[in-house]
Image (spheres, rainbow, N blue to C red):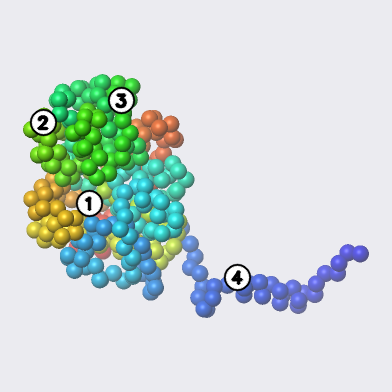
Amino acid sequence: MPSSPLPRSLLAVLLMAALTACAPQGGERAAAALAPDAPLPTSVPKGTKLIVGDPSTKVALQLSGEIDKFSFDIEWANLSGGPQTSEAFRADALDVGAVAEIPAIHATWTGLPVKIVASKFRKDALDHPTYELGIAPGTHVKTLADLRGKRIAYSPGQAQGALVLKVLKQAGLTKDDVTLVELPSTGDVYPNALASEQVDVAPIGGVNIKRYTTKFGKDGATTIRHGLRDDPAHLYVRTATLEDPAKAAAIREYVAAWARASVWAYEHPKEWIDGYYVKDQGLSAADGQYLVDLAGEPDLPADWSEAIARHQETIDILAKETGNEALKAEDLYDLRFQTVGADASKGGV
């Protein structure tokens, strides 16, 4: 026999019980997801916390006295770079990461939706490159055209690897015209590979530029400028994180503080060299001064159009060389944050 329908009163009781079981505890309602085109909230609810992987900004905020002024709690993660941040994102162990232009591309290609929420560059970028091409002792490379036939250190998925591909294109060369030697770009790997003549050319950055020529210049080691912009610095987050209104508001506040910290470090070079490069990084004051001079003045544009166009060029080069789908660069950016850093750097927000 077919079962008898339940009385309406019993159905109502069962439905109410089910709803009660699924409701948030403590009398609180779960906040509705923030739509990707909704205005950014400006008020951060009590109890909000961000996990941030941005070690240099942490030091700048400490030195400037702003680190205790956030309206939310911050847990600092001592990590940086694309592979580490993507791994932490996947483990739900990070909310904000500080990287260059490549990690957001590779995260998207590997099924990790992310958004860039802050962008910083270098004024007079061609005069203040992040990297130069290190040339091994005994290797003749004076111009980019001389790269033909050379062994070049290559780190796929990182800024240095993308730079190598851009440089080859600039020189009218392809990967078939050189030998790419896959090596991690961390620490002293590239300078040591050059000095031992494991490779002929490698993009080296920061204080390694100075140290390489100082240490091996007597043997014929040199560097040359590549003539391309290599200055992007971004904050990026998981797309899902921005669906949380509380975290979206906190991220907006963090972006503003990040921008002010960038300006503070430029305007207080002595304190920055001593507090960051010497005491935090263990470098000499001379190395710190070299890095400050190398970086120059930060540029925090309120319009990301040009940056997005340059990012698209990078995506197209990488897509062609790796066989991945060519992404639309604008899709990697959350344009709601476009003016936050710029406004904060000028005293707003």
Find residue 150 and report its image quarter. top left
- Using a 10 Å C-alpha cutoff, classify the residue at mark 2 as few (fewer than 14 neighbours), some (14 to 19) or many (20 or more): few
Sequence-wise, the earlier of marks 2 and 3 is 3
Sequence-wise, the earlier of marks 4 and 1 is 4
**Residue type pointed to by label 2:** Asp
Residue picked out by circle 3: 179
Q: Nearer the viewer, residue 288 or 240?
A: 288
Q: Nearer the viewer, residue 145 or 279?
A: 279
Residue picked out by circle 4: 22
Sequence-wise, the earlier of marks 3 and 4 is 4
- Using a 10 Å C-alpha cutoff, classify the residue at mark 4 as few (fewer than 14 neighbours), some (14 to 19) or many (20 or more): few
Task: Measure the C-alpha gap from mark 4 to mark 1.
Answer: 45 Å
**Residue type pointed to by label 3:** Thr
Residue picked out by circle 1: 300
- The quadrant of the picture occupied by the C terminus is bottom left
Residue under the point 11% across and 59% down: 274
Between circles 2 and 4, the one closer to the viewer is: 2
Task: Measure the C-alpha gap from mark 2 to mark 4.
Answer: 71 Å
Sequence-wise, the earlier of marks 2 and 1 is 2
Between circles 3 and 4, the one closer to the viewer is: 3
Q: Nearer the viewer, residue 256 or 268?
A: 268
Residue picked out by circle 2: 219
